[in-house]
Amino acid sequence: MELRRGGVGSQAGARRMDGDSRDGGGGCKDAGSEDYENLPTSASLSTHMTAGAMAGILEHSVMYPVDSVKTRMQSLNPDPKAHYTSVYGALKKIIRTEGFWRPLRGLNVMMMGAGPAHAMYFACYENMKRTLNAVFHHQGNSHLANGIAGSMATLLHDAVMNPAEVVKQRMQMYNSPHRSALSCIRTVWGTEGVGAFYRSYTTQLTMNIPFQSIHFITYEFLQEQINPYRGYNPQSHIISGGLAGALAAAATTPLDVCKTLLNTQENMALNLANISGRLSGMANAFRTVYQLNGLPGYFKGVQARVIYQMPSTAISWSVYEFFKYFLTKHKLESRTPY
């Protein structure tokens, strides 16, 4: 997918589309990189939001079966029929014993949340990154700016995604009584109140702020190494996104285990810990995990989490960068007289 617009190139110079003005020296760009950089220096807000929504929906749709396995493998006191030793083995067993479509239960509510959540997430990140880079590092790329921008974007993302996460994870659990997203919402609302949809919000933020900070800093750092001129390079987006996601996932697994416990309110685990009523709060979740499983309990499902996040972030970044490139290219062509 090439874009050659000499007139635009004379206006934009060698600046990157995301708004940075670093050109890395003249005359050494390859053709594809030059074509990409001839786009306007910053994509529009609508482009960021549309590209982000597409990235979020595709990321969660493709990887949803693995996410279902991850949720079950993080169970602190699983049913004997729901013991799994590997992601592949778990998927095979779930399909064989519970039906072909069982790993996809809850996908619809996740897609409904992922679209708007990722639209705001990427739009906020891009605009905050551009603003903060101008403050911290007048030319080029500041890792501090990237980390702060990722943290701010997470606040918006999780505000939308947290209720979807609650419903999705309850539907993913073994022997879940919920057969549809709507029935799950009605049951949770009626028995636990609207606050149940945000019971794990602070935990989610406690997990996702460090996750996204590591994720964005690593992604931008790797892009500097393997794609320094920020041309549209799918291979570099896949590699950088995948490695960034894997590192961030492994580092934040203990927080994800606690979030899963707060979302699912796993009855058998709470009974074993002599907890009556509902579990709330990150500190209580951490104590309960340690009480039931010790230090290894904080890393339950780490394999599934990394296997899920690595391709998820690779898909997310490659789809996002593609749509950002494609939509900006389309707008450019529509404005250019022939």
Image (tube, rainbow, N blue to C red):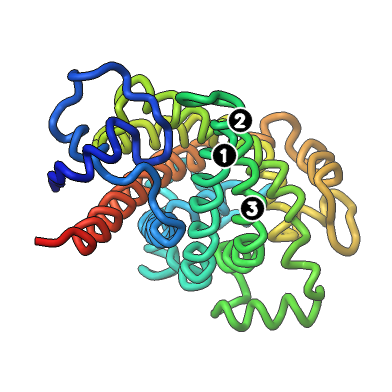
Identify whether 63 is placed above or below 218.
Answer: below
Nearer to us in this view, 213 or 89 = 213
Q: Which residue is mark 1?
A: 131
Question: Mark on residue 180?
Answer: none
Identify whether 257 is placed above or below 115.
Answer: above
What residue is shown at x 74% (from left), y 48% (from top)?
Answer: 203
Nearer to us in this view, 90 or 47 = 47
What residue is shown at x 24% (from left), y 36% (from top)?
Answer: 233
What residue is shown at x 55% (from left), y 63% (from top)?
Answer: 172
Nearer to us in this view, 220 or 300 = 220
Question: Mark on residue 135?
Answer: 2
Circle 3 residues within 10 Å: few <14, some 14–19, many ≥20:
some
Q: Are marks 2 and 1 in contact (CB under 8 Å)?
A: yes
Q: Are marks 2 and 3 in contact (CB under 8 Å)?
A: no
Q: Nearer the viewer, mark 2 or mark 3?
A: 2
> Which amino acid type is marked by label 1?
Thr
- Residue 309: horizontal and vertical position, in percent? 46, 42
Label 1 and label 3: CA atoms lie apart by 47 Å
Identify whether 226 is placed above or below 150.
Answer: above
Circle 1 residues within 10 Å: few <14, some 14–19, many ≥20:
some
Label 1 element class: helix
Position of the C terminus, as image quadrant, is bottom left
Question: Mark on residue 78?
Answer: 3
Q: Is residue 157 left or right of residue 265?
A: left
What residue is shown at x 80% (from left), y 45% (from top)?
Answer: 282
- Residue 262: horizontal and vertical position, in percent? 74, 55
Label 2 and label 3: CA atoms lie apart by 50 Å
Q: Is residue 39 left or right of residue 159?
A: left
> Which amino acid type is marked by label 2?
Val
Badge 1 or badge 3: first in the primary sequence = 3
Query: Is residue 94 in view?
Result: no
Badge 2 or badge 3: first in the primary sequence = 3
